Image (cartoon, rainbow, N blue to C red):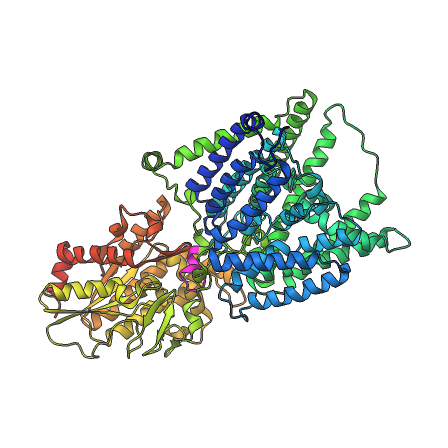
Amino acid sequence: MLESSSGIRNAQAIWAEQKARLPVFVGVLLCLSAIYFFQLEEDLQLFRLFLIFVAGFFVSGLLDGETRLKFIWALNAGAMFALFGVTAGLGILVIGLLFFLIVNLPIGVWWRALLALLSGGVLAMGKLGYLPFAEAGIVSTVIGGLFMFRSILYLYEVHHGWQNASVWLKLNYFFLLPNLIFVIFPVVDLKTFARTYQPEVSPETLEKGLLWMMRGMFHLLLYRIAYYYLMPDPAATSSVFQVIQYMAVSYALIVRLSGIFHLSTGMLCLFGFNLPPTFDNYFLATGFSDLWRRINVYWKDFMMKVFYFPIYFRFTKRNSVAVFISVMLVFLINWGLHQYQWFWIKGTFPVTIIDAIFWLGFGLLVAANSIYQIKTKKKRKKVKEFSLRAASVTCLQVIGMFTFMSVLWSFWTSPSIATWLELIELALPISAVQLALIAGGLVALYCIGIAGSYVSYYLDKTNKNPDQSLKVKAYALFWVVAVVLMVNPVSKWVETSLAIDLGPVREARLNAADAARQFQGYYETLLTGKDLATVGVAKNEDENSREWKPLGSFGIIKQNENEFSRSLLPDVEIIFKDARLTTNSFGFRDREYNFERPPNTMRIALLGGSSEMGAGVSDEETFENIVEDTLNQTGGLANSEKVEILNFALSGMKMPNQVMKAAEAITYNPQVLLYAIHTEETGRGLKEFIKIFTSEDASLFPEINEISRLAGLQPEMSALKKQSLLRPYARELVTWTARRIVKLAREANVKPVMMFTPVLELKNAKKLVEDEEIKNIFRKAGFLVVDVQTAYDGYDATNLRVAKGDNHPNAQAHRLMADELLRQFRNNTELIRLLEAVE
């Protein structure tokens, strides 16, 4: 290969390799398009990173091996500034180079380790917010991702005499491009990294890298679909089948981690780092030791090399006891390292009993499995013919392992042991019919497994297994079709023709359970769980939204005369979700009013939750203020010259709370009570209805206590079990709410109006039916129902949210709501007649 002194090869060499790289480059552009149209890992700036990668991949093909290493490192350095800005980018670059110099100092390895540890302590102070540097949080997170494990491996290898690498290869080992945004990243082995680097990237490596990238993106898409469509809400779970589904999907969500790892290592392969696979069909594990070998292979290799073997070989008698103690110590260290990793992502070091049970329990099972395999080890014979017995054993082992890991994973990802036990309680008792159906499902899985085993055997025997090229073509075809479906005219046609919403496929959205928690006022983050597999990464973009606190944490909500009546403190001003929130002297978010209604004034009392309160918008941007100002500027409403809309809405208010709030609002002498209702209002309010059953204030709600008795609620039952029993009585609960508020309104000569408000997500057929049922219940109770759900029609919901992952309406959405409500005031004849009849 002819090369110039500058490291750029001659035209003939370039043309020869570029011809071979052209199909791969086209595939890379297809990946870029898919990342863009599906907004894959958008919060982590994956599209921006991938743009840098695409440019780097093209240029790297023009360079020789050593020059390519220099270029790749320079590309990584430039990406720091492009992704995080000048200040944070410079901080990451400088501190990263300092850490690199520390682990390469010409002193003893233990002294280097001590200096690295002390420097890491200073960096941890930045993560905790104790340093004045404004970007310290981002810098410490990224540096932690780059160095937290690879520095351990590096010093381990140096301690054992390894020196075979150029400074540029060492720099690239620590500064890996995908690791800038993916804090949870494969623990790449140093020797493997150096050994597998190809100065001249082979076509096979290029093809493998493209395959892994496409497969990783496919896994990320599977994660999104499983999370949104298949993960049931534990609060809505009412049968053993839903519990089984919840457990299985909880475990299956690890595909996100698999997707990140495949995508990352695929990108590195295209730069010439021919790394081995990171995962190995982990859902097909036949035992605990087998799972340990298959899942997160790099992590397993890291733990075995750095911890297990040094511990095991210290024993003079390397028997079952040595294996047991070594494995248990390794899993104890494993637990600690996961907490260490969690710190660099979240800034906390949680130590929980659930984590202890999970890691030590899993370690105990792996140790027992390893000892059993040692004692029963037999030489495996190569099977020439298909064996039903062998296939059956394997199939049953796979089903058993997946089932056990689903249960264990659901336990590990639960907030507490009590919560997990509540989930188990929902599955009990199991009827004979349910047992028969479960058995039938297992038999069906067994049959599918046997069929799959035979197909695998047949393909092996006939040498017809799909090769790497065929797999790339299959993934490429999938992504071409998928991207075409996402292009605006096509996607609109598909959605209209099939009456489906492609939004949850096109972008990351909260599923039903997490969306409900968000509107209870304390769920503020997107797609994050307790386990590292679902957290995946720290969000580097939109830091403010990541740090938003629930309203209750500001200490401005007070309880009134009973447990179900609460208000905001009067005369306070805070910044909530990056917007100014001010309360008046009466303790509701609104401008100042007189307690007594002024003459010739139409006074409307608004009841609602966080959306109506205006979570995420400033005081003057709430729709009720816009409507009030507009009506007063245009001559008032009905027979009144002036309009006042008093906003009694408050985050976390559910139907029982609204009954209490209606009684409070009526004391301000309004003529109209405007109650804003949303989709799934009943489901979100079940917890509040359940509180009544065991509350000291239960005597205030005799009808609810009777409904609870009919549902079979018992005080000793778990909260999830109570919700499951009470859910079938949702209609009765809604009816009680509507009738109770109408009774209060009529006694005060106030006109009750129910306003059905829009949500920033499309509804399925079931939700539409539920909405109509709620409207009918309110009509029969005596409400005038005003439907303003068309307010957002024709607008992209992603542009109407307060932030990514936060479905509260932003300022534009509030303006649209105000416009629709004004149209109702001017054109809705029933509403006009009602307003003209007020006294």
Which residue is painted at 41% across and 64% down in the image?
Answer: 521
Q: Nearer the viewer, residue 485 or 722?
A: 485
Q: Nearer the viewer, residue 80 or 558?
A: 80
In the picture, measured across the screen, residue 626 lies left or right of residue 535, that is left
Q: Nearer the viewer, residue 557 or 62?
A: 62
Corner quadrant of residue 449: top right
In the picture, measured across the screen, residue 343 lies left or right of residue 325, that is left
List x then y, in percent, for residue 331: 72, 56
Q: Is 319 a magenta residue? A: no
Q: Residue furthest right?
A: 316
List x then y, in percent, for residue 187: 66, 49
Corner quadrant of residue 116: bottom right
Q: Is residue 190 visible?
A: yes
Which residue is painted at 50% across and 35% down in the image?
Answer: 28
Q: Quadrant of the C terminus?
A: bottom left
Q: Is residue 345 visible?
A: no
Q: Residue furthest front?
A: 5
In the picture, measured across the screen, residue 839 lies left or right of residue 380, that is left
Which residue is painted at 61% across and 25% down in the image?
Answer: 466
In the picture, measured across the screen, residue 616 lies left or right of residue 479, that is left
Q: Residue furthest top?
A: 462
Tell me where the magenta segment starts and ends, as one range.
Answer: 515-523
Corner quadrant of residue 105: bottom right
List x then y, in percent, for residue 789: 27, 52
Tally of numbered discs: 0
Q: Nearer the viewer, residue 80 or 39?
A: 80
Which residue is painted at 39% across and 64% down in the image?
Answer: 577
The correct choice, above or below, for 496 with respect to 825 in the image is above
Q: Quadrant of the N terminus?
A: top right
